[in-house]
Amino acid sequence: MDRIPAIDIADFYSADEPARRAIGQAIGRACEGIGFLQVVGHRVPAALIDDVRAVSLAFFDLPPEEKQRCRPPAGVLLRGYTPPETNTLSRSRRIETPPDFREILSAGSAQVTGAEYPSYPGARMFYNPNIWPERPAGLVPLFSAYVRAMEELSRDLMRLFALGLDLPETYFDAKIDHHFGVFHSLHYAARRDPPQPGQLRAGAHSDFGSLTIIYPPAGGDGLEVLSPAGPWVAVDPVPGAFVINIGDLMQRWTNDRWTSTLHRVVNPSDTSGWRERRLSLGFFCHPNYDAPVACLPSCLAPDARPKYDDILAGEYMRQKIMAVRHVAE
């Protein structure tokens, strides 16, 4: 498989169980083959996407010192502002490159209070209230609405994942109802200076969690996926589609039946391209901190042993995220 298939999920919301299972099986084939797909027929309003993009760009246009006031304190992850060149995604693959260009504004569920999972000290860094900027006006309700829409879409996709894995449709529901998923507004600013050797907008990496929902710019604008055959494939998204990929945790959950695929955001191919900024919207669905990640029953052959030891989802994610950060936590 060397293309990113587009799958219409509209019947998931209106059809009977066999039709929903057929969609899940199509998604399962994509996750086995290349680990990426596009979904159309979702219920996320186009107007909400456009408004979140616009208010994100307004935030990233603020003076650097104002954006810096939204940086999270030590010990807090996946909240607030992350300046450019403070993360190196390729480190997750034990590859050293110069840091990535992207800057990020992050928000999680509005329901998080910080009191979740008191018996797990490592959970505290993931479960914190959001850190909001004072400007631009309207950002907080728009980001909050987008996070809610992504939580609902993530739940629906995880149900389709379950059907694609020959599991009960609601198998994952109780494993994501206290999730620490995060929305990242991902900005790659216009630049004048050339990159350092080996430096990309986002280095080659696989995502860490269960699934990622990306709304990329038209044309993908540099997003590439490593195909099973070897070459990098440029993502050219269908208008209105979300690009979905599974992460390392889901590959581990499926005992390597599904593939968490390397991808990257490459630099513009000519000098003029650097004058164009890039913005994508990404939601990263991470399960409940205490969700046990053990080989799924449908992914283990008779008399076989799982490839991986059991681990809590939160502990797995903490190890992955800390590996790519430059700043002390």
Image (cartoon, helix red, strand yellow):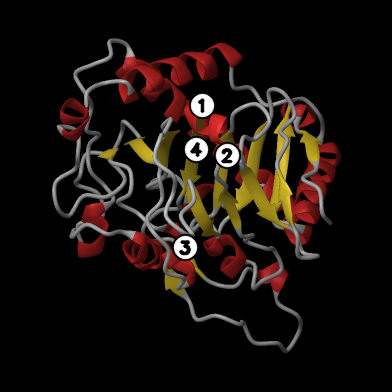
Residue at screen point 40% across, 53% down: 288
Where residue 82 sits, quadrant-wise, is top left
User: Distance of mark 2 from mark 4, alpha carbons?
Assistant: 21 Å
Q: Are marks 2 and 4 in contact (CB under 8 Å)?
A: no
Residue 37's disc number: none
Q: Is residue 200 left or right of residue 68?
A: right
Residue 282's disc number: 4
Task: Tell me the kind of residue under disc 1.
Answer: Glu
Q: Nearer the viewer, residue 325 or 15?
A: 325
Q: Are marks 2 and 1 in contact (CB under 8 Å)?
A: yes
Q: Earlier in the sequence, mark 1 or mark 4?
A: 1
Provide the secondary structure element on which disc 1 rests: loop
Q: Which one is closest to the eye, mark 1 or mark 4?
A: 1
Q: Is residue 158 left or right of residue 16?
A: left
Q: Position of residue 284 (x, y in %)?
A: 48, 45
Q: Is residue 76 left or right of residue 40?
A: left
Task: Tell me the kind of residue under disc 3.
Answer: Ser
Q: Are marks 3 and 4 in contact (CB under 8 Å)?
A: no
Q: Which residue is mark 2?
A: 268
Q: Which residue is mark 1?
A: 276
Q: Earlier in the sequence, mark 2 or mark 4?
A: 2
Residue 22 in view in this figure: yes
Q: Which residue is mark 3?
A: 90
Q: Position of residue 240 (x, y in %)?
A: 68, 23
Provide the secondary structure element on which disc 2 rests: loop
How dense is the environment of label 2, judged by Cα within 10 Å: few (below 14), some, or many (20 and up)?
some
Q: Nearer the viewer, residue 327 or 276?
A: 276
How dense is the environment of label 4, judged by Cα within 10 Å: few (below 14), some, or many (20 and up)?
many
Quarter of the image with the N terminus is bottom right
Residue at screen point 41% across, 32% down: 189
Q: Earlier in the sequence, mark 3 or mark 1?
A: 3
